[in-house]
Amino acid sequence: MLRAFESDADPLRDFRDYEAELIVSDLQVVEKRLQRLRQERNSGGEAQELGRLAKHLESGTPLRTLTMSEPEEQALAHFGFLSRKPLLVVVNVAEADAAKPPDPTLHIAAGTAGAQVLALSAEVEAEIGELPPVEQPDYLASLGLTEPARARFLRAVHALLHQICFFTVGEDEVRAWTIRSGDRAARAAGRIHSDLERSFVRAEVMHYDDFIAAGSEHRARETGKLRLEGKDYVVHDGDILHVRAGSGKR
């Protein structure tokens, strides 16, 4: 979180200072491990990979911009490198700037560092939270906004973590489930309960937007928006799933 609502605020400077701290911290970890490997006269694969990381960090660049294979990611995961973690830069702006895009210079700097930027006004968000739901749309419109920043924040976080949500709908409960982008229907069923993944047969699927447009599940079925999918179906963000397993339908 960076402040940009005061005259002396410099979010670009603060962002660069923060990134520099992460890079220095990671470089210290890498150099300490390399020193140990040199003492052990170990010049194998780990030493070579850490040498590549050290060179990248010494250039002042965070590790999140470095391309790594899945085996490399797994081999280095225990180091917990800070500059490798996904980063969302939230800029707290003045109320008058709540509807404006982030500063382009900061946006470019963050993008170069593999981070994303989101601008919001904490003051505005606090005021929205105090209003009755029916009054919030008019207040947002008066500021040139279409939705609270919370919704944009959640979408940005899900995107950074490569996560999506699907829904299950029952007579007395609607639930959202978080899965990895690219997960297939059987894996999504396992998110609900491990037994459902093992005994998965197929799923009835319709997208939230199609359901809203149709007005009902019955109408969505009539218009072909509700369909049967097998275990290899890739679940999309906003899908509504009725899972059919060996023991019945969930």
Image (tube, rainbow, N blue to C red):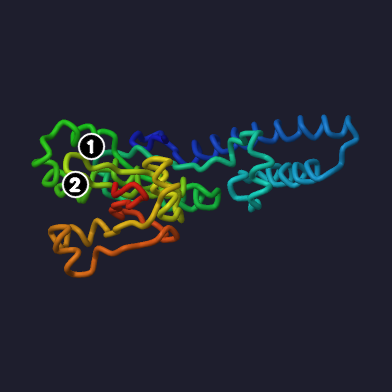
Going from N to C along the chain, the mark reached first, 2 or 1, is 1
User: Extreme left residue here?
Assistant: 134
Query: Which x, y percent locates residue 130?
Result: 16, 31
The disc placed on residue 212 is none
The amino acid type, in three-letter code, at marker 2 is Leu
Q: Secondary structure at mark 2?
A: loop
Query: Which x, y percent locates residue 212?
Result: 17, 58
Viewport quadrant of the N terminus: top left
The amino acid type, in three-letter code, at marker 1 is Val
Q: Secondary structure at mark 1?
A: helix
Q: Which residue is mark 1?
A: 124
Q: Residue at x 25, y 39 (%)?
A: 95
Q: Is residue 47 left or right of residue 198?
A: right
The disc placed on residue 143 is 2
Q: Residues within 10 Å of mark 2 (few under 14, many from 20)?
A: some
Q: How many badges with numbers are in the image? A: 2
> Quarter of the image holding residue 176?
top left
> Quarter of the image holding residue 237?
bottom left
